[in-house]
């Protein structure tokens, strides 16, 4: 019989509801236990069966993604992070994960602990973190909360990453009114590991010591996983106690201590205490090994007095790890952690009971069959509604006659979603460790693999407007955008990680957006041989019944075999030629031009042609490797003229545009967001050779123009200088944050 000296509330229907469990789910718990659960057990079930931990509404679709094969060393979802073979005995571990709700409640700590958590997922695999990225999304700039949320999130990301000494090499920031109630904070980390020193979370062997290391356990973060699986209401401020508090200095010590211990054969299994804390780490380790686990919670290092078993098991205090050691290695491990001034305690052992058994003050306070807890969570086949492809918009010629090209360009360059984000990345240390060779602001960040000629490129992308208009097309687009961003720096795309941010899955429309976005991601990933290695699903991004636009974020990773082949977007030399690879049809629907200039938000997103994406990208990477290309930038938000403008700004050069030969008007040509295109700078001496290669590979191209000293020239008329472009693009965010 289970006993506990502590008086807990009696488990009843209201208590069950407070824990985020339905009546049916509670009945299932009773069936599993063959009795009523006590309060501690109810808490354990509530976090393990939360959407955040169990993926009960999403796992069916996630299994349709390409999650194995190729250079993948572990299947997606099997470990804390993905692993991809880099050759020569090296591998990269990477993952992206959300910390949306905590960041909305407490922006600094929410963002900071998001960065800390994703780094632990990576170094748990034995990989030293070498780069961070992020994808952050905020409400309308006019919303009264946006500025403070942005300031807090950016400060939190920088504060944690800078302190621990890992460079932030890239990211994405957007503004949209759909995020007014729910901002999104997605953090990504890449690590580097020797293939013969990879560590896993699967426990093995009976009577093996279970070790707690890291910060002491406090009351912060209790019910964090449950909070992440619920919508917001007017009482958002009351949720602050569920937000974890981070300590990057302790994480740095924990990282070094763990990596030191990993140098010998002491560790059987290791797991970060992330969402659901000690509960999820212990259950998952034992479940993977088909073992039981016994924990004495009286031995858990606590920083607050009189903590209960319930609080200890559900706390999400940061900078903590759970380790299963080989017998006899305890003292050796203890010496290492004490040297790094990190708490160390033997708190339990593995068993053959196939149960999680919890003891506190010599009394058993919980006993649950592990497999039923971990693998028998409710799985839902949610109803969903298909999104029809919107009809194309017939833009009237009169609309364009009233427009001035220069005025349009100025307005879009200074748009919050186009404007320069240097104010953000200036707060991140992107050069620490000394291996960053392409900083934020390019198509992808790039870090050299220390001591080799290899380099790893990474980018993060999303496109909420496209996904909202037509989720299937939008899902394909973000994979292709990631592919293009890696190609644009000279990297061969190898794999992706995803963070899938959506509204309430119990609503058919929201669930339909999720299903079709995943279908699009899957289709594009399979065709491009660009598999998913890891990821995260964040549902219930809603406030007062109003959800976000579907925002799946794709973190793409590519390999540059020789970092000297890396390429940048800045225009290099006067009189060089500029080409646009890929066909321009002038698609304006869902473009930033349509939304900001024409005030038109309807219509379909641009089409995705996967054959062209693969063919053009493969041809271009070969041109880059043969050193036939001087600069590259993919065409995305804002179309050709925005892509070219950014290349002008980066290179401090101008361009003389050739006369448009297409049948479309000047606005459609310059601002259309047709997919699968790149702006490429080439030397005139290589023109004939490059054109032959493009023709031989059936790659459509247009001659766009010639690089000038500083002027932007259209129809033989200078319209702006590169300094003008810089001023319009650079000032919005800085002025917004100062005023």
Image: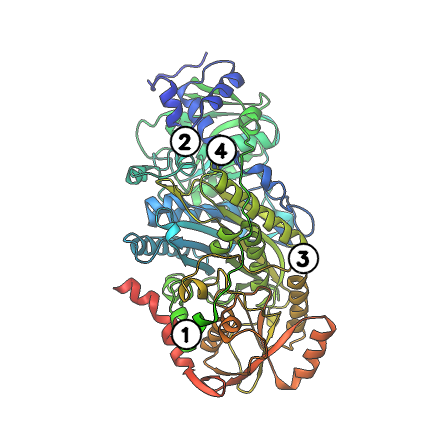
Residue 168 rendering spot, x and y as whole percentages: 45, 59
Residue drawn at (44%, 34%) of the image: 276
Q: Earlier in the sequence, mark 4 or mark 1?
A: 4
> Does the CB distance between marks 1 and 3 fall below 8 Å?
no
| CA separation in Å, label 1 and label 2 | 59 Å
Q: Earlier in the sequence, mark 1 or mark 2?
A: 2
| CA separation in Å, label 3 and label 2 | 40 Å
Using the image, determine if residue 23 lies above or below residue 602. Answer: above
Q: Earlier in the sequence, mark 3 or mark 2?
A: 3
Residue 271 rendering spot, x and y as whole percentages: 52, 39
> Does the CB distance between marks 1 and 2 fall below 8 Å?
no
Residue 575 occupies quadrant: bottom right
Give the residue pinned by disc 2.
Answer: 314
Residue drawn at (29%, 39%) of the image: 234
Asked which secondary structure carries label 3, the reply is: strand
User: Of all residues shown, which one is farthest toward the left?
Assistant: 739
Give the residue pinned by disc 3.
Answer: 87
User: Of all residues shown, which one is farthest toward the top?
Assistant: 1
Give the residue pinned by disc 1.
Answer: 403
Left or right side of 106 for 43 = right
């Amino acid at each position: 019989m289970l006993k506990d000296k502590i008086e807990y509330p009696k488990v009843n229907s209201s208590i069950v509801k407070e824990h985020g469990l339905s009546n049916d789910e509670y009945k299932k718990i009773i069936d599993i236990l063959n009795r009523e659960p006590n309060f501690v057990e109810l808490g354990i079930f509530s976090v393990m069966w939360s959407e955040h931990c169990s993926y009960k509404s999403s796992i069916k679709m996630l299994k349709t993604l390409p999650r194995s094969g190729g250079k993948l060393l572990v299947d997606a979802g099997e470990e804390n992070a993905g692993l991809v073979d880099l050759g020569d005995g090296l591998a990269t571990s990477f993952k992206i994960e959300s910390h949306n709700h905590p960041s909305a409640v407490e922006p600094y700590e929410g963002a900071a602990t998001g960065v800390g958590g994703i780094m632990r997922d990576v170094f748990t695999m034995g990989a030293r973190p070498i780069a961070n990225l992020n994808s952050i999304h905020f409400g309308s700039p006019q919303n009264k909360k946006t500025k403070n949320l942005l300031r807090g999130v950016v400060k939190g990301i920088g504060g944690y990453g800078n302190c621990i000494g890992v460079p932030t090499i890239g990211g994405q920031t957007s503004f949209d009114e759909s995020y007014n109630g729910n901002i999104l904070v997605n953090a990504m980390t890449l690590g580097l590991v020797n293939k013969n020193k990879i560590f896993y979370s699967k426990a093995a062997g009976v009577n093996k010591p279970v070790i707690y290391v890291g910060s002491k356990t406090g009351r912060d973060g209790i019910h964090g996983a449950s909070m992440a699986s619920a919508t917001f209401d007017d009482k958002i401020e009351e949720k602050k106690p569920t937000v974890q508090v981070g300590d990057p200095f302790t994480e740095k010590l924990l990282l070094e201590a763990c990596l030191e211990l990993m140098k010998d054969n002491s560790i059987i299994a290791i797991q970060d205490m992330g969402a659901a804390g000690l509960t999820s780490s212990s259950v998952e380790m034992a479940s993977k090994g088909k073992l039981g686990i016994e924990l004495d919670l009286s031995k858990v290092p606590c920083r607050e007095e009189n903590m209960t078993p319930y609080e200890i098991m559900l706390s999400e205090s940061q900078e903590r790890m759970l380790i299963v050691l080989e017998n006899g290695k305890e003292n050796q491990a203890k010496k290492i952690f004490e040297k790094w001034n990190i708490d160390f305690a033997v708190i339990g052992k593995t068993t053959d009971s196939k149960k999680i058994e919890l003891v506190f003050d010599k009394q058993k306070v919980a006993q649950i069959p592990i497999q039923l807890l971990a693998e028998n969570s409710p799985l839902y086949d949610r109803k969903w509604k298909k999104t029809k492809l919107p009809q194309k918009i017939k833009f009237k010629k009169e609309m364009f006659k009233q427009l001035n090209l220069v005025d349009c360009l100025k307005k879009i360059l200074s748009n919050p979603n186009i404007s320069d984000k240097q104010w953000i990345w200036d707060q991140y240390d992107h050069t620490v460790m000394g291996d960053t060779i392409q900083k934020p602001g390019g198509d992808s960040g790039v870090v050299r693999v220390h001591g080799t000629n290899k380099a790893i490129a990474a980018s993060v992308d999303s496109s909420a407007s496209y996904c909202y208009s037509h989720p299937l097309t939008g899902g394909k687009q973000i994979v292709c955008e990631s592919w293009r961003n890696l190609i644009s720096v000279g990297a061969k795309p190898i794999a992706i990680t995803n963070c899938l941010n959506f509204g309430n899955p119990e609503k058919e429309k929201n669930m339909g957006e999720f299903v079709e976005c995943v279908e699009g991601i899957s289709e594009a990933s399979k065709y491009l041989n660009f598999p998913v290695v890891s990821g995260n699903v964040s549902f219930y991004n809603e406030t007062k019944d109003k959800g976000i636009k579907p925002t799946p974020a794709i973190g793409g990773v590519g390999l540059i075999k020789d970092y000297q082949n890396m390429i940048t977007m800045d225009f290099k030399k006067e009189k060089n030629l500029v080409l646009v690879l890929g066909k321009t049809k002038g698609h304006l629907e869902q473009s930033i031009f349509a939304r900001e200039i024409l005030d038109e938000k309807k219509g379909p997103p641009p089409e995705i042609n996967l054959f062209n994406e693969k063919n053009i990208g493969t041809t271009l990477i070969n041109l880059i490797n043969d050193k036939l290309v001087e600069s590259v930038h993919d065409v995305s938000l804002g179309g050709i003229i925005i892509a070219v403008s950014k290349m002008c700004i980066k290179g401090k050069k101008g361009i003389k545009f050739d006369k448009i030969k297409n049948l479309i008007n000047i606005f459609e040509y310059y601002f259309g967001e047709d997919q699968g295109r790149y702006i490429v700078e080439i030397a005139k001496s290589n023109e004939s050779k490059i054109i032959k290669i493009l023709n031989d590979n059936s790659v459509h191209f247009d001659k766009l123009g010639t690089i000038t000293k500083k002027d932007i020239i259209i129809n033989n008329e200078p319209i702006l200088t590169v300094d003008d472009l810089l001023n319009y693009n650079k000032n919005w965010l800085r002025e917004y944050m100062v005023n």
